[in-house]
Image (tube, grey):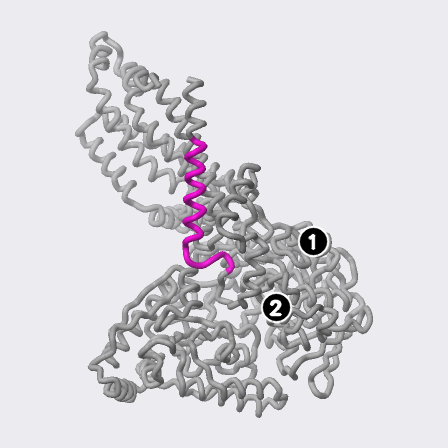
Amino acid sequence: MSSCTAPNNVEQALGDKTLHFGLGAEPQYLDPHLASSVSAHNVIIALIEGLVSEDPKTLKPVPGVAERWEISEDGLVYTFHFRKNAKWSNGDSVTANDFVYSYRRILNPNLASQYASMLHGLKNARKYHREGTSWEDANVGVVAINEHTLQLTLENPTPYFLELLNHYSWFPAHPPTIEKFDAFAKQGTSWTRPGNYVGNGPFVLSDHKVNSVIEVTKNPNYWDADTVSLNKIRFYPIESADTEERAFRSGFLHLTQTVSPDRIDYLKENYPDLIHFESYLGTYFYRFNLDKAPFDDVRVRLAFNLATDRKAIVEKVTKGGQTPAVCFTPPETGGFTPKARFKFDPDKAKALLQEYLNDKGLNSLPKIELKYNTSEGHKKVAEALQGMWKENLGVEIQLLNMEWKVFLSTIAKRDFSIARAGWIGDYVDANTFLHMWRTEDGHNNTGWSNARYDELLDLAAKESNATRRFSLFDECEKLLSEHAPILPIYFYVHVTLRSPTVKGWHPTLLDHHPYKYVRLLKGKE
Amino acid sequence: MSKFILLRILQAIPTLLVIATLTFFMTRMAPGGPFDSEKNIPAEIKAKLESHFGLDRPLHEQYFLYLQNLLHGDLGPSFKYMGWEVSELIAKAFPVSAQLGLLSLGIALLLGLPTGIVAALRKNSKYDYLLMTIAMIGICLPTFVLGPLLILIFSSWLGWLPPLGWYSLSDMFLPSLTLGLFYAAYIARLTRAGMLETLNQDYIRTARAKGASPIRVISRHALKGGLLPVVTFLGPAFAGLISGSFIIESIFFIPGLGKFFVTAAFNRDYTMVLGTVLFYACLIIILNLIVDVIQATLDPRSRNL
């Protein structure tokens, strides 16, 4: 018997061209200068377009608001020429001054944007954002040459700069709207509500019911509206993976944000065409606290690393197609693949630990705490490692799960011995991974500091030759593996369910999918 | 009676103040804050962020400011849902939860009362055992098991009802049933117990002796007393039902109040925690008052207040 009452969105969508999208979490902000989450990204890219846009397959920069650009020979000055028909959704033209205004807004310390540091690559941006210099005196490297030409000057040649522009922190906001709602330096205003929101992207915000739906409708004023095939996208913030799966299987959703790990085996067997495993630019790892014994000694950190069978973790525990993290930066990140250095060698591990114990006159290590934020998945990995380390090193590990916010404050206070972590790249370049182990980086949180490492990254920042740059990065990776302030475990994979009617949707490393290329069709394209 | 009601309303004020105070300080004592995230932000930027929402002021100042705003009916902005006021989020979610709650209550009463009455009248018969066993299973079966089970049967296998959402009438049936069955089971057991106690009273025997028909004995005499425990239970149960159920809302993707209530604590969305707690407290106070009034009309003994 077929359903007589349930609305089958997926079937209807072939006619009304509405994409029904599982969003996962409700975004905290829809303001591009304040947003800080994947779910916010997924909505904002429908509403706003940056200087450049993304190729749907490779994510390489393609013309967006700027129809063309020039890069100076030293790689420091980018000149963007705007297309004349780039419009805001209310019909206003998108101008170079709108971008100057936007960059001044996000860098304004009073706005307190969490992602403002993404713009620190702009010349003098840091001076204005962090060092108290006024905008006029700081001379930040963003200038509107004329209404349709924008010039950006960088601190260092940044080979991935154009890719960086596709992060929402670089997106423009409509100045008259921001002014109308007094949102230039203020959070929590209502400019981001339907009816108020003015964007320049392929869609406009048409409805927002918190915890229920965010709806965007095709923007007739978008310069490339002819390419846009979808009439609407409805984003549903369904947090429970099981509910999302039921929604998908009943034809309510075209695609899910995630799949419950417990369901992967079943879905793989029964719906092999609908479940998708796509590489995702992220590393799952553990931090050691170098201020606490025994992890103040590199031999212990190395012993734990060598006693970790990463292959067994991905094959027997996570089972979602993840790959063992034998380095920290995921392979093929912007063309860079580090050498595999984190190896499994339980004998060597045992020997190193014994050497440490002998030095310290100990018989065995005291019980060690491993902290993780409460989640079934994290628990399984932690339990597997607990067993592995017991077997390979004879170490007793006590697992301690914590509620998310408690966990975050514990990490920030460095009140741990070993703690779970994950890092998702903000852009496709090794810098987004390696930068966090610099001495002063706020994400380091291990107590590890290495002058040579910092220097290598400084050199890489100034290096424009890709081969030389990659070899500097590889040296960083080597230092990481020798000092082992961390224990990489696996590289993330994004697992989703997707209807075969969704066309023009390609696996990409950042899980970005420019919606203007998405079409809903039955059968083959 | 009006003096009684007025007194109860006056008593509610210190109760609410205590609840607001405890909630305020307990949320602040929990580690972490609304703006903690995996993305590390420099201390001075975080301080600016907190100053946007007055979180940089001394705690007692924040507390008195909150109370002052509360007197004006201002619950403050949500820290998690930026750009939205707590009061408007509650105003939007409450009707959904109230709808779900009322429907569930309807189902619970419709199933629970007759079941309890029949079981009491056929005490220790096979009907009694069967019905009370089912009711016991109903009480023991958590909604997170029952919900997916009902979805499996009515949506996946039979295809009669949608598995989630809150858009049309047909969407409302499965969640209301899931929530209602649990309460139906409870009501059935309470009704049975209440009825059994009443049926043993002298005035029932008198009514029977005077030749009243069994239906009249039950409907005119026994029910009135037999339902007292159910009415007592219904006050807080009703408040619980209409203020939202986090689990049912998650399973069926319903934009009700329960989700705000529970996730606010995880998000350290201080204003939302306070707003939902106070809203819930008011609901319970009002409903308890109504229950007392109903009880007074049902039972003359409780009137002498």
Q: Residue furthest right?
A: A146
Q: Quadrant of the C terminus of chain A?
A: bottom right
What residue is pinned by disc 1? A182
Which three-letter amino acid code belongs to the residue tagged 2?
A: Ala
Q: Is residue A263 left or right of residue A351?
A: right
Q: Nearer the viewer, residue B243 or B178?
A: B243
User: Taking the image as drawn, is residue B254 in sight?
Assistant: yes
Amino acid on which disc 1 is placed: Asp
Q: Secondary structure at mark 1?
A: loop
Q: Residue at x 50, y 64 (%)?
A: A498
> Image quarter for residue A124?
bottom right
* A161 over B91 or under it: above or below: below
**Spatial CA span between label 2 and label 1:** 19 Å
Task: Kindly tell me whether residue B158 is visible in this rendering.
Answer: no
* B31 part of magenta stretch: yes
Chain hosting mark 2 = A
Residue at x 57%, y 64% (from the top left corner): B45
Q: Nearer the viewer, residue B143 or A273?
A: B143
Which chain letter matches label 1? A
Q: Which residues are magenta?
A: B12-35
Residue A420 rendering spot, x and y as whole percentages: 39, 70
Q: Which residue bears the numbered disc 2?
A: A116
Q: Secondary structure at mark 2?
A: helix
The answer to whether residue A292 is above or below residue B1 is below
Residue A418, x across and y down, in percent: 35, 73
Q: What secondary structure is the stretch in magenta mostly built from? A: helix
